[in-house]
Amino acid sequence: MKLSRRSSSRGQSVVEFALIVPLLIAIMFVIVELGVIFSTYVSLTNSAREVARAGSVYQYLTPEDLEGDTPAVARAKIDAVREAYMDSYLQATLNPIVAITTLDDLNPASGDRYRYDDVSFPNAYRYGGKLIVDLEYDHQLFFSLFGDSTITLRSRSGMKIEPGGL
């Protein structure tokens, strides 16, 4: 019995397809994973920038609220209320793709999400100083075929603290 060239090439196509499908599926998984990582990074960066902006224009405590306080106590009060405000703003702007249980999950290794530059300013509101927001997130990979199943994403944003009418 003689096989025709046409029927043998059909079997060859099936074998080629069977050999290439795992590679195509692996490439598809990598593309999906990279898309999710990029989306998470963009969300983290946007939140850091928005929170830094909100904190840089924060001016809710008035001089009357700080009356009788020493400059160090007044600055500590303002910083505590500003940071609580920034925490609430962070929760509002963070994309749901960043899966956290508490804001402490976004702390960098130092444990400080919010920092101020080390220049000492004469006013309690730190006008002219720089507010720096550091966010760090351990993203759980969906498809971890090789070793560690998390990747750490970091974002930093800084803004100059603006003066106000107070």
Image: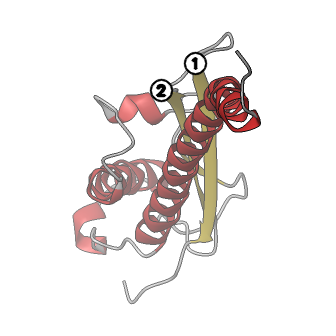
Q: Is residue 67 visible?
A: no
Q: Residue at x 68, y 13 (%)?
A: 146
Q: Residue at x 56, y 74 (%)?
A: 127
Where residue 166 appears, x then y in whole percent? 36, 83
Q: From the image, which quarter does the N terminus lie in?
A: top right
Where residue 132 appears, x then y in whole percent? 60, 55
Residue furthest to the bottom: 165
Q: CA distance from mark 1 to mark 2?
A: 6 Å
Q: Is residue 108 visible?
A: yes
Where residue 150 appears, x then y in whole percent? 57, 22
- Residue 1 higher or lower than 34, as above or below: above
Residue furthest to the left: 65
Q: Nearer the viewer, residue 147 or 74?
A: 147
Q: Residue at x 73, y 58 (%)?
A: 119
Q: Is residue 77 left or right of residue 147?
A: left
Q: Secondary structure at mark 1?
A: loop
Residue type, mark 1 in image = Ser
Where residue 45 sits, quadrant-wise, is bottom right
The residue at which mark 1 appears reads as 144
Q: Secondary structure at mark 2?
A: loop
Q: Which mark is residue 74?
A: none
- Residue 91 higher or lower than 112, as above or below: below
The residue at which mark 2 appears reads as 142
Q: Contact, CB < 8 Å: mark 1 with mark 2?
A: yes
